[in-house]
Image: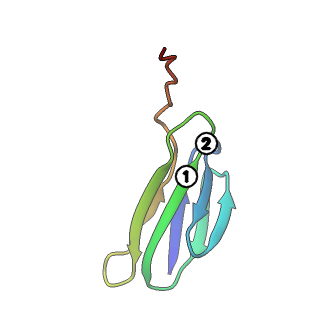
Amino acid sequence: LDIQLVSDNLTDVTLLRIGNIGSFEQHSVSLKPGRYVAVGRRAGYREVREEFTVGFGLTPVSVVVQCEERIVISNRR
């Protein structure tokens, strides 16, 4: 089944059990039925994980994976 992954062209996306996809705005991937986790990483931002199910009437039209929450580093003394 085809799934459309959507990102911001800044986040590095990895689909667990499948492999690294990299940075993109839209990427189509063909997946077998099952549960998947897309992980997004971007320097200076909190990692994101998007879990989704393919098949069984639960297939999403698209999955958005983009890091938006900036990590604030505070100097504690």
Q: Which residue is mark 2?
A: 42
Q: Which residue is mark 1?
A: 40
**Residue 32: image location, x then y, percent:** 51, 85
Task: Depth check: give the residue in front, 17 or 7.
Answer: 17
Q: Is residue 42 above or below residue 57?
A: above
Q: SS for tag 2?
A: loop
**Residue 49: image location, x then y, percent:** 45, 56
**Residue 62: image location, x then y, percent:** 45, 62
| Amino acid found under the numbered disc labelled 2 | Arg
As drawn, is 11 to the left or to the right of 33? Answer: right
Whole-number angstrom distance, CA of label 2 to CA of label 1: 7 Å
User: Dividing the picture into quarters, in which one does residue 58 lie?
Assistant: bottom left
Answer whether labels 2 and 1 touch (C-beta < 8 Å): yes
- Can you name the residue that lies furthest to the front here? 77
Task: Depth check: give the residue in front, 43 or 77.
Answer: 77
Q: How is the image coloured?
A: rainbow
Q: State the residue at coordinates (65%, 52%).
A: 24
Q: SS for tag 1?
A: strand
Task: Depth check: give the residue in front, 54 or 75.
Answer: 75
Q: Is residue 39 above or below residue 37?
A: above
Q: State the residue at coordinates (32%, 84%).
A: 56
Q: Is residue 47 above or below residue 69?
A: below
As drawn, is 70 to the left or to the right of 9? Answer: left
Q: How many marks?
A: 2
